[in-house]
Image: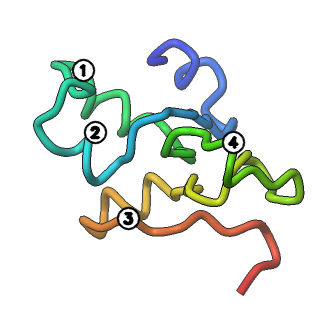
Amino acid sequence: MRRVREKYPQKDIWCYTGYTLDRELLEESRARCEVTDELLSMIDVLVDGRFVEELKDISLPFRGSFNQRIIDMKASLAAGQVLPWKLAGEG
């Protein structure tokens, strides 16, 4: 991830995870390890939450089910709370 950031600093890095940011990746859990904070700091957008077939909706942009969130990682880490990512042009 460090090499990608160095070589392509203008690129947005997205990450998809079945874990939730605030309940599993930022707290003590089996999903968290010694490199979690560094990895999260290099991600621009995180799509969190597991895909749930019963909540599937193919009209959702960049995610498969309603329970999944699209998170602005830079803003969320700076604010200390989960903040949604917005498509360009959204309010």
> In the rendered view, does 57 fall on the left or right side of 50?
right
Disc 4/disc 2 C-alpha distance (Å): 23 Å
Q: Earlier in the sequence, mark 2 or mark 3?
A: 2
Disc 4/disc 1 C-alpha distance (Å): 30 Å
Given this view, does label 2 or label 1 mark the residue nearer the observer? Answer: 2
Vertical relation: 66 (above or below) 53: below
Given this view, does label 1 or label 3 mark the residue nearer the observer? Answer: 3
Q: Secondary structure at mark 2?
A: helix
- Classify 10 Å Cα crowding around label 3: few (below 14), some (14-19), many (20 and above): some
Q: Which residue is mark 4?
A: 53
Q: Name which residue type carries label 3.
A: Val
Q: Which residue is mark 3?
A: 82
Residue ranking furthest to the right: 59
Q: Name which residue type carries label 2.
A: Leu
> In the rendered view, does 66 fall on the left or right side of 26?
right
Circles 4 and 1: CB atoms closer than 8 Å: no
Vertical relation: 46 (above or below) 32: below
For the point 44% across and 18% down, the residue is 2
Q: Earlier in the sequence, mark 4 or mark 1?
A: 1
Q: Earlier in the sequence, mark 3 or mark 4?
A: 4
Residue ranking furthest to the front: 54
Q: Earlier in the sequence, mark 2 or mark 1?
A: 2
* Foreground of the two, 52 or 39: 52
Q: Secondary structure at mark 3?
A: loop
For the point 45% across and 68% down, the residue is 83
- Classify 10 Å Cα crowding around label 4: few (below 14), some (14-19), many (20 and above): few
- Classify 10 Å Cα crowding around label 2: few (below 14), some (14-19), many (20 and above): some
For the point 50% across and 45% down, the residue is 48
Label number found at residue 35: 1
State which quarter of the image contains the C terminus.
bottom right
